[in-house]
Amino acid sequence: MSWIEEVPVDVPPVIACMSINKPAMEAVRALNAAVTFGASALTRFQEECIATTVANANRCRY
């Protein structure tokens, strides 16, 4: 199928599913990066720990 494009491996599946509309995928990816791991006094590890704890509290399976 020639319309399918490969997306980078580091793209989460929830964003990769938008790969058919590359501008939309890139916009969501950029927004996610800015909101999730933007300028902060916390380290990336601390942010990941908080994200994991919140996801667990919300009973997210990912």
Image (spheres, rainbow, N blue to C red):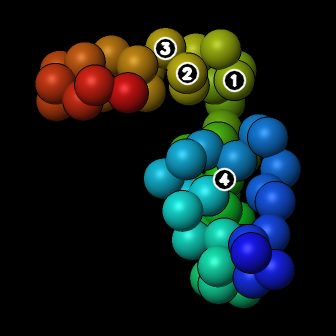
The reply to whether discs 1 and 2 touch (Cβ–Cβ < 8 Å) is yes
**In the structure shown, which secondary structural element does the residue marked by tag 3 occupy?**
helix
- Point out the tag, 1 or 3, that comes first from the N-terminus: 1
* Residue at (38, 27) in percent of width and height: 62
Residue 54: which numbered mark, if any?
none
Position above or below: 42 against 8: above
The reply to whether discs 1 and 4 touch (Cβ–Cβ < 8 Å) is no
Q: Mark 3 — residue?
A: 49
Within-10-Å neighbours for mark 4: few <14, some 14–19, many 20+:
few
- Point out the tag, 4 or 3, that comes first from the N-terminus: 4
**In the structure shown, which secondary structural element does the residue marked by tag 1 occupy?**
helix
Within-10-Å neighbours for mark 1: few <14, some 14–19, many 20+:
few
Q: Inspect the image, locate mark 2, and give the three-letter code of the amino acid beneath it.
A: Glu
Position above or below: 2 against 10: below
Q: Mark 4 — residue?
A: 33
In the rendered image, residue 25, in percent from the top left (x then y), is placed at 65, 72
Q: Mark 2 — residue?
A: 48
Q: Mark 1 — residue?
A: 44
Q: Inspect the image, locate mark 4, and give the three-letter code of the amino acid beneath it.
A: Ala
The reply to whether discs 2 and 3 touch (Cβ–Cβ < 8 Å) is yes
Q: CA distance from mark 1 to mark 3?
A: 9 Å
